[in-house]
Amino acid sequence: MFHRQAAQFAVALLGFALFVPTSLAQARLANVTILATGGTIAGSGATSTTTVGYTAATVGVQNLIAAVPELAKVANVSGEQVFQIASENMSNEHWLTLARRVNTLLAQPNVDGIVITHGTDTMEETAYFLNLVVKSRKPVVLVGSMRPSTAMSADGPLNLYNAVLLAAHPDAAGRGVLVSMNDQIQSARDVTKTNTTTTDTFKSTDLGMLGYIQGGKPSFYRAVTRKHTTESEFDVGALTALPQVEIALSYANVGPTQVEALMAAGAKGIVHAGVGNGSLPARVKPALVAARAKGAIVVRASRVGQGILARNGEANDDQLDFVVADTLSPQKARILLMLALTKTTNTREIQRMFYTY
Ligand code: DAS
């Protein structure tokens, strides 16, 4: 009898001895919430070689987490399915919902970081929007994949693992919203999708990525210089909608039709994606002048993709009362102008914002 009790006590002691370190280890891990929105990372195809022509946004967040059991070694992970969409369908309303959920979660002391799984088509836009409205220094990391989860050499699982370990790492705090793909760390402000299908598609070209993730460790080599998150003057708290801002693309032989149609549709701001250094084609300029005269804010941007959009360079912005986009792409200039219009219609103030964020 005594021997049996002694054996039971020994087993219990062993179990406790094993339990304590495990629970202590778990207790030491950061708490990371994964907010799933859809995209290819949640996509599935008919065969293992289907890397185009698959269906995006079919796999739920719990299955994404279950597919990478190694996540439990780098963070205490929980998941929420916020949306389940291909990101070409992302809308202003989705952004407001997502931003509110992010800010609510990050205000909780038991949430240390957030990973957002997202389609790659508009990931750079969602990332920049959140970069301007998240009210926390805690890490927010967007991640996606270029191959569906069913494909040979799918990039989603390792991308998700790296994104979670980045969101759990103290070095990622205070750097603005991050995009983590292909073992690289990019800033929300400067990253853009550069290839339709390859896994190295996200780049920050001229201005450079922030660092790498290698062997389960993030290493930062540069930092962003523009304001973001807790330094931002923008707040989505009370907003029920974002002002309508549209983009007009210029090209050889372009006419005024786009600008006129966008104004007729109620645009409060027009981003002109001009050729070269934001040049205004002779047939488009009058339409933009008319738009300004009706109270719309006009931002000169460039379709080129790199470089500073020089104020008073290809047009007399002082005289036209236009704003220039600095180094923001047309799609990101649209986001900043939408948020700017929630604060002011003063073009000098808006130009300051384009030189600040
Ligand atoms: N349609 C693309 C999207 O959802 C798929 C992807 O690349 O994530 O953005």
Image (spheres, rainbow, N blue to C red):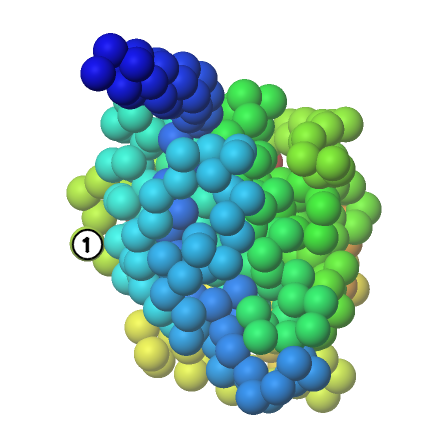
Specify the quadrant that holds the N terminus: top left
Residue at image location 52% in from the left, 78% down from the top: 44
Residue at image location 71% in from the left, 67% down from the top: 153
Picture layout, residue 8 above or below residue 32: above
Q: Residue 331's x, y, as percent?
A: 55, 61
Query: Is residue 82 rendered to the left or right of residue 332?
Result: left
What is the residue that sits farthest to the front in this orientation? 1
Which residue matches tag 1?
Answer: 240
- Residue 173 appears in the figure: yes
Instruction: Give the number of marks.
Output: 1
Q: Residues within 10 Å of mark 1 (few under 14, many from 20)?
A: few
Nearest the camera: 338 or 168?
168
Query: Is residue 271 rendered to the left or right of residue 130?
Result: right
Residue at image location 69% in from the left, 73% down from the top: 152
Secondary element at tag 1: loop
What is the residue that sits farthest to the right in this orientation? 206
Specify the quadrant that holds the C terminus: top right
Query: Is residue 268 rendered to the left or right of residue 299?
Result: left
Picture layout, residue 325 above or below residue 282: above
Residue type at mark 1? Thr
Q: Quadrant of residue 60?
A: bottom left
Q: Residue 347's x, y, as percent?
A: 46, 44
Nearest the camera: 163 or 197?
163
Query: Is residue 90 rendered to the left or right of residue 96?
Result: right
Nearest the camera: 186 or 294?
186
